[in-house]
Amino acid sequence: STATFTSGPGPIPTVIPTPTQYEVSGETGHRTLWTVFALMVLSSGVFSILSWNIPVSKRLLHVVTTLITITASLSYFAMASGHATSFSCTTARDHHKHVPDQYYTECRQVFWARYVDWAITTPLLLLDLCLLAGVDGAHTLMAIVADIIMALSGLFAAYGTTATQRWGWYAIGCISYLFVIWHVALHGARAVQAKGQGVSRLFGSLALFTFLLWTAYPIVWGIADGAHKTTVDTEIIIYAVLDLLAKPFFGLWLLFSHRAIADTAVDVGGWWSNG
Ligand code: RET
């Protein structure tokens, strides 16, 4: 096959015949995507039922948490039905196998719905944590914007064709992530002191859980999407487990604790509850 690629900062269009290798998902990945879709729909139903006899003015955490799993349901439907996916191709020089050097192209399936999902749901997860701790609007907004930049950086990294593009965006994403973590930990810990001990302990546990779980994503991305060291199916399975912990499990933990601990009541003035 042939590949068109450019090298260097100025585009030098060249057509060089290169062997192309495709990495695509298989039956296991497909089944996993449908299973997670079903579980996300189920969780959305459960979260809706949990808000049933709670007045709308007190439902903010329920609404945010339900929107998270509804968004995940849509993104998993898109991925499972074979939508929202395309190939990202990189051309590299193969130094070892051929004399003289030969170029080869590797095209890996990218499920871009994942990044759209993350750009919507990770800000909502941060909103949950910030509302719980009572972080002010300004700091919440800054964490959310940095988080959106993080998720979009992942999308650009996944479609980069050169190492500079891919790892450059990845580095920008990691810096944004550090900003998010630092912001939520610092301002969350500070703000939650004004609430009861029960809320402090709950926020501490949820924030630590979030930090540990979220840190797995850039590691998995680096190994699977960045370095292409796993198959597409393995990547689907790992993200599936992480997503189920980050959304349905996190949501159940938050909403049941919210129900049990009175101090977790959210106060955003008249903006949500109209006074
Ligand atoms: C990317 C690559 C760029 C660098 C970093 C990343 C972090 C991703 C994270 C994703 C979290 C997703 C969650 C989904 C919920 O279901 C985009 C992989 C830092 C933290 C919690």
Image: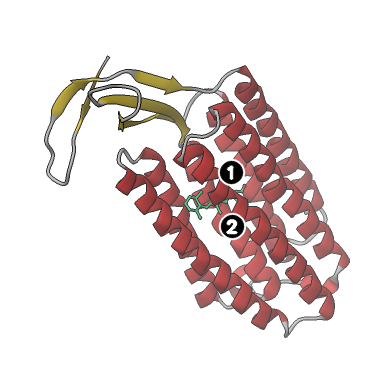
Q: Mark 1 near ligand 1 (CB under 8 Å)?
A: no
With 109 as the anchor, is 14 left or right in this view?
left
Element at label 1: helix
The answer to whether the residue labelled 1 contacts the one labelled 2, judged by CB atoms less than 8 Å apart, is yes
One can see residue 135 in this view? no
Of residue 98 and residue 16, the one placed in the foreground of this image is 98
Of residue 266 and residue 234, the one placed in the foreground of this image is 234
User: Residue 146: x, y in percent?
Assistant: 46, 64
Disc sitting over residue 115 in the figure: none
34 relative to 156, above or below: above
Disc sitting over residue 71 in the figure: 1
228 relative to 16, above or below: below
Residue that numbered label 2 is attached to? 124
Q: How many marks?
A: 2
Q: Give me the C-alpha separation between circle 1 and circle 2.
A: 10 Å
Q: Residue furthest bottom?
A: 194
Q: Residue at x 84, y 72 (%)?
A: 262
Give amino acid for label 1.
Thr
Of residue 224 and residue 26, the one placed in the foreground of this image is 224
114 relative to 195, above or below: above
